[in-house]
Image (tube, helix red, strand yellow):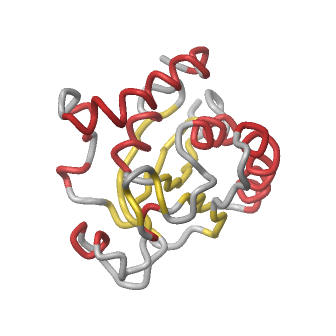
Amino acid sequence: MNNLEIATFGGGCFWCVEAVFQDLKGVEKVVSGYEGGKIQNPTYREICSGLTGHAEVIQIHFDSNKISFESLLKVFFATHDPTTLNRQGADSGTQYRSVVFYHNVTQKATAESVAKGFAAELWSNPIVTEISPTTVFYEAEVYHQNYYKNNPNQGYCRVIIDPKIAKVRKMFSEQLR
């Protein structure tokens, strides 16, 4: 029996974050979108301005009988830099911030624990990941969905996303389909 839950993470460009979760056991669906801003129905162009307050995020629909929220958080913290405020690599601005939008008090407590434990042990600089209650999730435009799977040979995918996927395969191989 499925026990579907939702996790919402932002860790830079949503193409990268989406790709690292799609092949994990228990992950039913990953959707790229926007959350945490001050306007309704934002577009990608508006998000890129940095003026809306939204972060590029992914929503993970997962079966908690097959993969835990804690396991998802460990993959999240291992595959982006949670120590840089409003930046991932060359991407800078609040839309690229490291953020966990929790959906219940258990997720909040788990996110705080993993950030203070696992993530703090993995990274030498302080963790600056925002941990906030979920707000309204807006699904990104169709061309952003499954970006890596639809464009695996695109330069950005090869240079930026491939190493993240390789890291997941190495560190979390037992959780792959």
In the displayed structure, does residue 144 sit left or right of residue 136? left
Q: Is residue 9 above or below residue 172?
A: below
In the displayed structure, does residue 45 sit left or right of residue 2? left
Place of residue 12 in the rendered image (x, y in percent of width and height, measured from the top left): 44, 54
The residue lying toward the viewer, choosing from 125 and 18, is: 125
Q: Residue at x 29, y 69 (%)?
A: 48
Quadrant of the snapshot with the N terminus = top right
Q: Is residue 166 above or below residue 88?
A: above
Badge count: 0
The residue lying toward the viewer, choosing from 133 and 19, is: 19
Place of residue 145 in the rendered image (x, y in percent of width and height, measured from the top left): 26, 46
Q: Is residue 51 above or below residue 84?
A: below
In the displayed structure, does residue 133 sit left or right of residue 46? right
Q: Residue at x 53, y 44 (%)?
A: 80
Q: Residue at x 66, y 61 (%)?
A: 128
Q: Is residue 138 above or below residue 109?
A: below
Q: Residue at x 44, y 57 (%)?
A: 57
Place of residue 156 in the rendered image (x, y in percent of width and height, measured from the top left): 26, 39
